[in-house]
Amino acid sequence: MSVTTLSSPVLPQRQPNWLVRLFDYKPFLIAMCLAPAIGLLAVFLTYPLGLGIWLAFTDTTIGQKGIFVGLDNFQYLLSDPLWWGAVSYSVIYTGIATFGKFALGFWLALLLNNHFPFKSLLRAIILLPWIVPTVLSALAFWWIYDPQFSIISYLLVDVLHWKSSNIDFLGSPWPARFSLIAANIWRGIPFVAISLLAGLQTISPSLYEAAMLDGASSWQRFRYITFPMMMPILAIVMTFSIIFTFTDFQLVYAITRGGPGNSTHLLATLAFQRGIAGGELGEGAAIAVSMIPFLVFATLFSYFGLARRKWQQGEAND
Amino acid sequence: MAWDSGLRRLMMIYLPLGCFVLILLFPFYWMAITSFKPNAELMNYREHNPFWISSPTLAHIKHLLFETAYPRWLWTTMLVAIGATTLSLVASTLAAYAIERLRFRGSPYVGLGIYLAYLVPPSILFIPLATVVVQFGLFDSPLALILVYPTFLVPFCTWLLIGYFKSIPYELEECALVDGATRLQILRRITLPLAVPGLISAGIFSFTLSWNEFIYALAFIQSGANKTVPVAILTELVTGDVYQWGALMAGSLLGSLPVAIFYSLFVDYYVSSLTGAVKE
């Protein structure tokens, strides 16, 4: 990121003409316009990012300045089963949740792309899970997953008689992991659906008409027109989704806090537990920094993996 | 034939759509219904139908408003959201104007840099930011949140506003320049008024994102009174082993309402700018 530092000279006396002329001087105006945004980002984003990487190489604790310890923190993490657990759950969480969100979101987008009454109202309602603060909807899920009074258990046991006993959603590792993934998919569907719907609406109907004339089935129209045409937008939305799912914090912290038995820690919640709650700033920072390679890899993979297809399509855009 | 295609439409479109709506909205229904259920009904599925309330009560909401610091948390959250939104709108409007309208060498790179800042997730930044906040003496102060939230709001709003500024014809500004208007006058009298829809959507997005924010508020705020709603509900209302689900759900419901109301007022801007931003 390019940082334009500028020392805005203290403006002498009030001379309207002079001031106005100064603001009409383009380089000065540009600098003044960019100063607030770049200043905020430099102080609260770029600097902390650098500081975080530095902290990861120190043994800083809360209230105590650390010294440089080289790769010690990372070596320790590599021998820490909790870190490996968090890495594998983060990957599983991101993988399954992204797949679920995109499969269901794409389906919902295709459904919404049809014509029916109250369409815009429906679109507005469907975005709700995405608008409402995650922690607050996570609390609703926590209650839905209650071991004794879960409404899902009630339905399965007392109404449908499919199961004989209540499901212990959050009490053991794998059910807890999948319960969290389900909540994450629920929250992610609206955003994916609305974004993909925007993409669907840019596809020219003439393409479908031409395909219909050639006798393409509805599956073929999806496979050879809709899907390839959606690749560029899928690449962007998926990149965003992967980054924010992998670094998710709220949902896990609100519902399980990493439990039971540390089985649902994501890297972000583990970093919080070590860094802020445990006071080991250096180690927490190292865990946070260890997310970066995964993020870079996932970004490159999703972006270029999907965008390359777009390039292969060549001049398919009409 | 017509009946057949009608049935097909029902099975292929309306039925799945209905399931989606049901599943997407159910947690809110459950949240709302729990908020008004007396405790006796809450824990007794044998004698009461869990999907309905036999004798609704306002006890949970009363408890929340009069026996906890909930109003205070709402107020703090509102203050933080409004402060962060104002700051971000000013900063990103100016930045977007400079990048899109004042065109200079390197403006695409500045734009790209600001956009990339959006891709830095808060969960990587919160530990070093906590030390920065302590250094500035802002620990436990809502001001810290107002200053920190723009790190994810400014990139988003700038990106959104660049798109809006792009849609305003250059000729308007050129005419004004020829007529002898200064650049600041042009910004204030011509460009900004035309960009109002963009400003509104950037404002809604900022407000909802600030209201939603969790990890920074959790890490930087210590004292119960200064917490924001999402953090306070989780850390102050969840006490002991017996969860007060009624009060918790009432807190979640009340905490969601401001965003939901705000959103419903401007829903068209919201949806169109969301789709517009993705189309870019």
Image: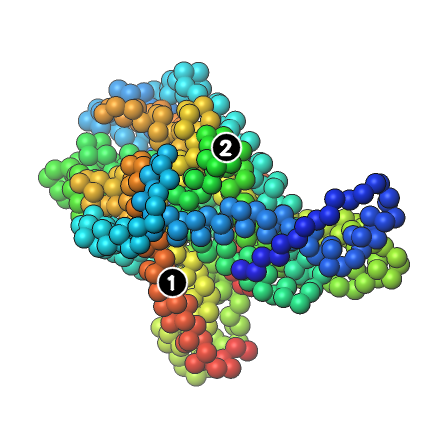
Foreground tag (1 vs 2): 2
Q: Quadrant of the C terminus of chain A?
A: bottom right
Vertical position of residue B100 compared to residue B240: above or below: below
Residue drawn at the location 65% of the way across and 45% of the way down? B90
Seen from the viewer's position, the closer of residues A174 and A57 is A57
Q: Secondary structure at mark 1?
A: helix
Q: Which residue is mark 2?
A: B137
Residue B20 visible in this rendered orientation of the protein:
no
Determine contact: label 1, label 2, CB under 8 Å: no
Q: Position of residue B201 (x, y in %)?
A: 59, 48
| Rendered image: mark on residue B35 | none
Residue drawn at the location 34% of the way across and 49% of the way down? A68
Q: Position of residue B37 (x, y in %)?
A: 33, 24
Classify residue A310 as left or right of residue A295: right
Q: Residue furthest bottom?
A: A214
Q: Position of residue A247 (x, y in %)?
A: 36, 51
**Co-location on one chain, circles 1 and 2:** no
Chain of residue at mark 2: B
| Rendered image: mark on residue A296 | 1
- Amino acid type assigned to the residue bearing label 2 in the image: Gly
Vertical position of residue B246 compared to residue A152: above or below: above
Residue A258's image quarter?
top left
Seen from the viewer's position, the closer of residues A274 and A207 is A274
- Amino acid type assigned to the residue bearing label 1 in the image: Val
Classify residue A309 as left or right of residue A95: right
Q: Secondary structure at mark 2?
A: loop
Badge 2: few (under 14), some or many (20 or more) residues near its Cα, within 10 Å?
Answer: few
Q: Position of residue A129 (x, y in %)?
A: 41, 44
Residue A277's image quarter?
top left
Q: Residue furthest front?
A: A67
Seen from the viewer's position, the closer of residues B159 and B167 is B159
Chain of residue at mark 1: A
